[in-house]
Amino acid sequence: MKKWQCRVCGYIHEGNEPPEKCPICDADATEFFLVNPKEEEDLSPIAIDSVPVAEKLSFGGRSFDILTDQIYKNHLHPITVHFPNGVLPAAVIFVVLSILLNHNCLQEAAYYNLILVTLTLPIVLFSGYVSWCKKYNKAMTKIFIIKITSAAICSSAAIILVIWRYNDPTIMDATSSTRWLFVLINIVMLAAAGLAGHLGGKLLFSNR
Ligand SMILES: [Zn+2]
């Protein structure tokens, strides 16, 4: 049985022919190359070195290249993304609990947590962009379109919620007419973060 590896995400397929589409990243058959049985033993789960991509970012000078290389090699994106991904669900849970228990201090907690999420966004988004350029050569297959869209929705929602709450501290009061819209944006933000995280895991652990 031959082994084929997806150039975009590192997924390994066994068979006489490469698959029509990669089940992980949706890349087509032309993106698959035959894995030499000898080389195969050296493949890491994410096959970083075997993927002949690593396009340089097109802006900035040499020091910028060194910086982005370090961001990629030290896995800054999966590391930093855990900060907002851990805190964001707490913020949404506090919002829901503040309604259920009618406790104003819980929506305050949600607000402060969401400020923390928003502050981490620049580094999370930038390190994600660097990984996408260097590891996946800016591949624009279905999985990346969905992942980038959900990251954009999640980030926009977090920024909107923080600014909204800053301008209207009474937004979560029972008398507020737009309270449910505020809660709905919280739910959308959580769903988008979950989806982006799920797809990130799918890409990272595609060979397990
Ligand atoms: Zn793939």
Image (cartoon, helix red, strand yellow):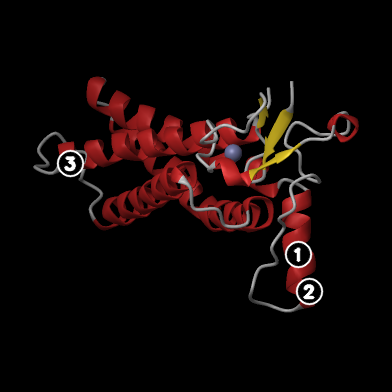
Residue density around tag 2, few if under 14, some if 14–19, many if 20 or more, within 10 Å: few
Is residue 169 placed above or below 91 in the rendered structure?
below
Q: Circle 1 is placed at which residue position?
A: 67
Q: Position of residue 62 (x, y in %)?
A: 79, 76
> What is the three-letter code of the residue carrying label 2?
Ser
> What is the three-letter code of the residue carrying label 1?
Leu
Q: Are marks 2 and 3 in contact (CB under 8 Å)?
A: no
Q: Is residue 204 left or right of residue 190?
A: right
Could you say which disc has been placed on residue 181 in the image? 3
Q: Position of residue 97 (x, y in %)?
A: 31, 24
* Sequence order check, earlier mark of 2 and 3: 2
Q: Residue drawn 78% across and 74% down? A: 63
> Viewer-proximal residue, 126 or 175?
126
Q: Are marks 1 and 2 in contact (CB under 8 Å)?
A: yes
Residue density around tag 3, few if under 14, some if 14–19, many if 20 or more, within 10 Å: few
Is residue 159 placed above or below 110 in the rendered structure?
below
Q: Position of residue 34 (x, y in %)?
A: 74, 37
Q: Circle 2 is placed at which residue position?
A: 63
The Cα–Cα distance between marks 1 and 2, rounded to whole angstroms, is: 6 Å
The Cα–Cα distance between marks 2 and 3, rounded to whole angstroms, is: 45 Å
> What is the three-letter code of the residue carrying label 3?
Leu
Q: Residue drawn 80% across and 33% down? A: 44
